[in-house]
Amino acid sequence: MKKFTCPHCGEPTFSPLQKALAGSLRTRGKPCPKCGKRCCNDMTSIYFSAVVSVLAFIAVMVIYLFHTERVFSSILIVCIILGSLLLCFLFNMFFGKLTRPLRILE
Ligand SMILES: [Zn+2]
């Protein structure tokens, strides 16, 4: 499986799952298994999640305004929210790059 390169030591140390769990620039990130310095997902991840949340919000609003079937609408809204979270997670797993977190504490 494809591995992601650590921005500190340049070694392919992050698996897609580890990268997805590394968080965004606003978090502290996850330490690299090789050099121990912290890495996180870069700006593309933030842009992507912003676009997805806007689309999810619009979809939820449309359903809220036009669907009268309450149970079905609630299920659909929950699915959209979970789906958008999953989409962001998958994006971080397979796209974007790793970078140094903005808050470097170590
Ligand atoms: Zn490293």
Image (cartoon, grey):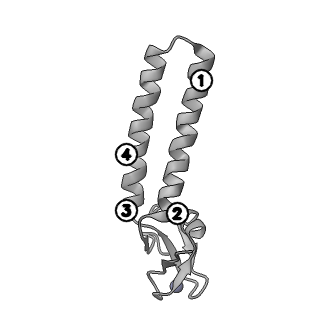
Q: Is residue 85 left or right of residue 61?
A: right
Badge 4 marks a residue whose secondary structure is helix
Which amino acid, mark 3? Met
Give the answer, above or below, for where 28 lies relative to 69: below
* Residue appearing at x 37%, y 62% in the figure: 43
CA gap, disc 3 and disc 4: 12 Å
Q: Position of residue 59 (x, y in %)?
A: 43, 30
Give the answer, above or below, for where 98 lies relative to 34: above
* Residue appearing at x 42%, y 59% in the figure: 45
**Residue 76, picture quadrant:** top right
Q: Which residue is mark 1?
A: 74
Which mark sits nearer the N-terminus, 1 or 4? 4
Mark seen at residue 17: none
Q: Residue furthest front?
A: 1
Q: Residue furthest top?
A: 68
Which mark sits nearer the N-terminus, 2 or 3? 3
Give the answer, above or below, for where 21 lies relative to 88: below
Badge 4 crowding class, 10 Å Cα cut-off, few under 14, some 14 to 19, many 20 or more, is: few
Q: Which residue is mark 4?
A: 51
CA gap, disc 2 and disc 4: 17 Å
CA gap, disc 2 and disc 3: 14 Å
CA gap, disc 2 and disc 1: 29 Å
Badge 3 crowding class, 10 Å Cα cut-off, few under 14, some 14 to 19, many 20 or more, is: some
Q: Which residue is mark 3?
A: 43
Which mark sits nearer the N-terminus, 3 or 4? 3
- Please name which of the two marks, 3 or 4, marks the residue nearer to the observer: 4
Q: Which residue is mark 2?
A: 93
* Residue appearing at x 52%, y 56% in the figure: 90
Badge 3 marks a residue whose secondary structure is helix
Badge 2 crowding class, 10 Å Cα cut-off, few under 14, some 14 to 19, many 20 or more, is: many
CA gap, disc 1 and disc 4: 22 Å
